[in-house]
């Protein structure tokens, strides 16, 4: 929504005070929310915060309030999350101010209190749900204290053999928060989430495995160079034909990649054993890593739909994991690049015969490749680096 409004869009936010306590409990349900103490009965006649259905119930009220604001203002640049409302409007317009005024009017008519301390805007920069939004620079930023807290938790975890379930929940919560700004980082959260199932009580201890430490170190390395600011993600997925990949299916030549009017190829290293050259899944993953390594900066904050003619690679890239140690040795550096450039990657399977151009590059069939339009002439010849892969 904010990206559609353009650079320097105006933002405002308001928060409902004592949110859940605004909703009364119907008398028929009083028996469910009562207790006896010192010979007296006490009944909670308003929606309690700790009730399992409290959030879902209040969300219905917030949605109704959201609808009323849109109907009265004839504007739809508004979003909400439970009791937090965000309003927006184009630069130098009155839309944001009008939405905020409409919110105040409707809340006053309905008797809904507003938290004045949480009110901000109209402005081009504010914090919403803990994350900073700057429409002048078109960036999302993580507050410094949040990033520092995550680093502290990661360091404590890395130096421990076991931590409690409560400590792991605090760590996963911090990771989930930062991944709101960095969706590509979710691939390095899965193992932390999976570890939660090994304990059931807050004081139960969870073993910090080698795999958890690997993901921990990746996050620490990333945060050391992270300035807390991330460009707005691309609102649309890059079309399928923007990035076409293919590799030689026999394993006797090499691989080729195409990105817009650029292309690159890499010959398989002579030192690769026949065992590696027979691993088609690994070979099909190499051009993907090659493309992201070469053009990752140009694809920063993009959502990419990638064409791959190998079903195994499609599954591996979409699930961010593999049972093969060899494949994982290439996949993990690739995922680090995606995290570094905040690239969201989704793979789709296409029949091999449709990737004619990229396949011609991978097989070094230059006569076939020369039939493409002249603009596709800028190329890069890649070589293999043993510490990462194609460079």
Image (cartoon, rainbow, N blue to C red):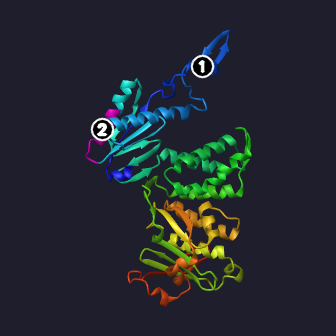
**Picture coordinates of residue 341 (x, y %)?**
49, 62
Question: What are the residue bounds of the magenta stretch?
Answer: 91-102
Q: Is residue 152 above or below residue 103?
A: below
Label 1 or label 2, whichever lies nearer to me, is 1
Mark 1 is surrounded, within 10 Å at the Cα level, by few (under 14), some (14 to 19) or many (20 or more) other residues, namely: few
**Picture coordinates of residue 211 (x, y %)?**
69, 58
Which residue is under mark 2? 97
Q: Earlier in the sequence, mark 1 or mark 2?
A: 1
**Picture coordinates of residue 107 (x, y %)?**
38, 28
Query: Is 178 positioned to the left or the right of 209 in the image?
Result: left
Q: Is residue 308 magenta?
A: no
Residue at 33 percent across and 51 percent down: it is: 5
Q: Is residue 93 magenta?
A: yes
Whether residue 67 is visible: yes
Instruction: Give the main secondary structure of the magenta stretch.
Output: helix
Q: Quadrant of the C terminus?
A: bottom right
Q: Nearer the viewer, residue 3 or 340?
A: 3
Which residue is under mark 1? 28
Q: Is residue 25 above or below residue 335?
A: above
Q: Label for residue 333?
A: none
Query: Is 192 positioned to the left or the right of 22 in the image?
Result: right
Residue at 68 percent across and 71 percent down: it is: 326
Q: Is residue 238 above or below residue 227?
A: below
Query: Is 319 positioned to the left or the right of 200 in the image?
Result: left
Whether residue 391 is visible: no
Q: CA distance from mark 1 to mark 2?
A: 42 Å
Mark 2 is surrounded, within 10 Å at the Cα level, by few (under 14), some (14 to 19) or many (20 or more) other residues, namely: some
């Amino acid at each position: 929504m904010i990206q559609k409004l353009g650079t320097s869009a105006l933002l405002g936010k308001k928060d409902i005070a004592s949110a859940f306590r605004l909703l009364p409990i119907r008398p028929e349900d009083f028996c469910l929310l009562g207790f006896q103490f010192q010979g007296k009965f006490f009944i909670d006649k308003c929606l309690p915060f700790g009730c399992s259905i409290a959030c879902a119930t209040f969300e219905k009220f917030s949605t109704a309030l959201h609808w009323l604001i849109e109907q009265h203002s004839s504007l739809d640049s508004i979003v909400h999350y439970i009791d937090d409302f965000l309003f927006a409007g184009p630069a130098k317009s009155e839309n944001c101010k009008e939405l905020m005024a409409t919110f105040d009017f409707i809340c006053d008519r309905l008797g809904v209190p507003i938290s004045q301390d949480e009110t901000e805007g109209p402005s081009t920069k504010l914090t919403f749900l803990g994350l900073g939004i700057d429409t002048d620079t078109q960036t999302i930023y993580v507050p410094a204290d949040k990033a520092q807290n995550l680093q502290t938790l990661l360091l404590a975890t890395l130096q421990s053999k076991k931590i409690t379930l409560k400590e792991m929940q605090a760590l996963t919560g911090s990771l989930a928060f930062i991944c709101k700004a960095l969706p590509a980082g979710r691939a390095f959260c899965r193992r932390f989430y999976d570890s939660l199932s090994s304990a059931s009580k807050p004081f139960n201890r969870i073993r910090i495995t080698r795999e958890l430490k690997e993901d921990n170190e990746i996050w620490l390395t990333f945060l050391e160079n992270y300035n807390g600011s991330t460009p707005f993600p691309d609102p649309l997925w890059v079309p399928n034909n923007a990035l076409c990949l293919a590799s030689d299916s026999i394993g006797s030549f090499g691989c080729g990649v195409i990105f817009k009017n650029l292309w690159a190829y890499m010959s398989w290293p002579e030192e690769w054993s026949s065992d590696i050259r027979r691993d088609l899944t690994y070979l099909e993953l190499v051009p993907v890593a090659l493309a992201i390594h070469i053009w990752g900066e140009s694809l920063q904050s993009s959502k990419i739909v990638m064409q791959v003619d190998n079903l195994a690679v499609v599954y591996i890239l979409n699930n961010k994991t593999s049972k093969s140690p060899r494949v994982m040795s290439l996949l993990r550096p690739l995922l680090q690049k995606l995290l570094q450039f905040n690239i969201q990657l989704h793979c789709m399977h296409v029949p091999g015969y449709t990737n004619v151009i990229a396949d011609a590059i991978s097989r070094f069939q230059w006569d076939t490749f020369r039939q493409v339009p002249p603009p596709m002439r800028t190329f890069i010849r890649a070589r293999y680096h043993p510490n990462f892969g194609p460079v």
